[in-house]
Image (spheres, grey):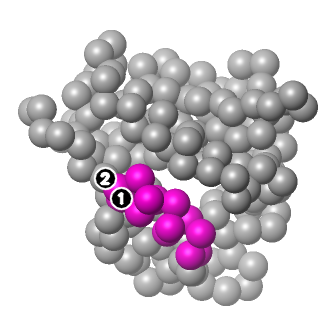
Amino acid sequence: MDDAARIAQIYNKEIATNTATFEVDPVGEAAMANRIAAVQAAGLPFIVATDVLGVIGYAYASPFHERAAYVHTLTCSVYLDAASRGRGLGKALYEELIRRVSTLADSPHAPVHSLVALIALPNDASVALHESVGFTRAGVIAEAGYKFDRWIDMGYWQLRLPRTV
C-alpha cells in the first residue's frame, strides 16, 4: 500500500507518546505494509482518511483470535494524526468500518457478529468515541500492560451486530 509510510508515522507517534497501543518499538514502512496486506488478504477492511495534505487517519478490522470459533468476531482500531482529532473523523471512520464489516460477503469472517475494541484505561476520549457508535463496556483486565514505567488497565468494548448466524 502506498500509504504505509504515513500510516506508520501516525502509529509510531502513538507508540512513542501514548498508551493507545501497547507496542513499544517503532514499526517500519515495510512492516506496516505487511500488516495492511494481511488485513486485506483476510477480506477485511482497512480504511484510510485523507485530506489535501495526505493521510490523516485510518481504521481497520482484524481477526479477534485465531481459534475457529472466533471467526465471526473481529477486533478493530482507529488512529488519527494528532492535528486531526476532535473533528468527528474517528467517528466517521468507525461508522464506515462498521458498515463495511456488516456487509462483508467475500471473507471467511462473514457474517461478522461482533466487534471488539481494546482501550487502554483511562482514556475518556476513546471510550466516548466507541460508545458514540454503539460499543458497550464488556470488561476490564487490571494491569494488563506495562508501559511508560506504569501498569495500565485494558478495557474491552464490544459491538454486537444484528445476528445472522
Would you place residue 127 above or below residue 84 in this image? below
Q: Badge 2 local density, few (<14 within 10 Å), some, or many (20+)?
A: many
Would you place residue 111 above or below residue 144 in this image? above
> What residue appears at the point 26 percent right and 34 percent down from the top-left corner?
112
Magenta stretch secondary structure, dominant: helix
> What residue appears at the point 56 percent right and 29 percent down from the top-left corner?
46
Q: Secondary structure at mark 2?
A: strand
Q: What range is drawn magenta here? A: 123-135
Amino acid beneath label 2? Leu
Amino acid beneath label 1? Phe
Q: Secondary structure at mark 1?
A: loop
Residue 62 seen in the current view: no
Q: Quadrant of the C terminus?
A: top left
Question: Looking at the image, which residue sits at the far right?
Answer: 53
Q: Position of residue 92 (x, y in %)?
A: 55, 42
Answer whether labels 1 and 2 touch (C-beta < 8 Å): yes
Please tell me whether residue 131 belongs to the stretch shown in magenta.
Answer: yes
The residue lying toward the viewer, choosing from 13 and 86, is 86
Horizontally, is 134 left or right of 47 in the view? Answer: left
Q: Earlier in the sequence, mark 1 or mark 2?
A: 1
From the image, tell me which residue sits under label 1. 135
> What residue appears at the point 56 percent right and 80 percent down from the top-left corner?
122
From the image, tell me which residue sits under label 2. 159
Q: Quadrant of the N terminus?
A: top right
